[in-house]
Amino acid sequence: MKDAKETAPIQMPLHWSGEGEVPITIHRSSWTDPDATFVGFKGGSPSANHGQMDVGSFVLDSDGERWALDLGAESYHRIESRGMNLWSRTQGSDRWTIFRQSNHGHNTLVIDGQLQRAAGSGELIQFSAESEHAFSVMDLSSIYRGQAESTLRGVALLSSAEVLIQDQISGLKPGSRVRWGMITAADADEVGGSTIKLRAEDASLGLTILTPTSVKWRLIDTASPRNPWDSPNSDTRMVSFEAVAPQSGELTLAVLATPGSCSDSLGTTLQLRPVDEWGKP
């Protein structure tokens, strides 16, 4: 009989890619370390059943805390009781005026204040489960059709248990404004620079803008309802920055998330590569 104190080795993978019309990928640094980093990344289409404009969104845990969170769905009954058309999937649907349903209320991009395209779809085009090179890349181009020609978002879990979120956008109108945002329940300090520190209990997470170097972090209130039909999102805020497209119409946005438990950050040595080259030797 096996000693009860012995435990079977964990067989679950550290990196996983789901298949289907709504691709989801997961990367985690460990199953046994309580300080492990976990990042989940979502594609798909807003027009899917019960869909939201959350394509390209992510959730992030480290040091036992959830730092990047999803606000969840709005109450369908409350919306329908106002006579609003919740079930239309057209671009002009009432559904997309709800904060929790739109890209304004998710950890993804907003270009010139516009909505994602309801008929678009975020496709998983690259996935790596290699321990030293674990990443996922989604093609969000059809989600931002008419706002940019090509939009790629990559999420990588580095060997340091840090997470890199990198966007590669081309075909923007010069002067277009691209907002990067992440909703959190953590307290934030050091606002106004290229690095912001999130704190929850005894844990912390640093967020550093690697590029563009000219932009600064700011906070957006997500706790207060935007509209009479929106629910409050108590004790939440969005850490964000806004980048302006140059004459070339090309922008690269890169953010490094560093857990407080990380003793050897790659932030000073990390060399960024274009997202579409992540899978190349």
Image (tube, helix red, strand yellow):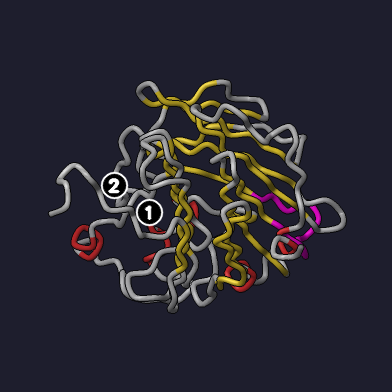
Q: Nearer the viewer, residue 63 or 213?
A: 63
Residue placed under numbered mark 1 in the picture: 100
Highlighted range, magenta: 168-178
Tell me if I can see residue 109 in this picture.
Answer: no
Q: Position of residue 29 (x, y in %)?
A: 47, 46
Q: Which mark is residue 109?
A: none
Disc 2, SS:
loop
**Image check: 210 left or right of 110?**
right
10 Å crowding of disc 1: few (<14), some (14-19), many (20+): many
**Image check: 95 left or right of 29?**
left
Q: Amino acid at mark 2?
A: Ser
Of marks 2 and 1, which one's residue comes earlier in the chain?
1
| Quarter of the rendering containing residue 167 | bottom right
Q: Amino acid at mark 1?
A: Arg
Q: Position of residue 142 (x, y in %)?
A: 61, 73
| Quarter of the rendering containing residue 52 | bottom left
Tell me if I can see residue 107 in this picture.
Answer: yes
Which residue sits at x=37%, y=47%? 31
Badges 2 and 1: C-beta atoms under 8 Å apart?
yes
* Quadrant including the N terminus: bottom left
Residue placed under numbered mark 2 in the picture: 231
Report the Cα–Cα distance between label 2 and label 1. 9 Å
**Image check: 134 left or right of 28?**
right
* Quadrant including the C terminus: bottom right
Which residue sits at x=56%, y=34%? 258
262 inside magenta stretch = no
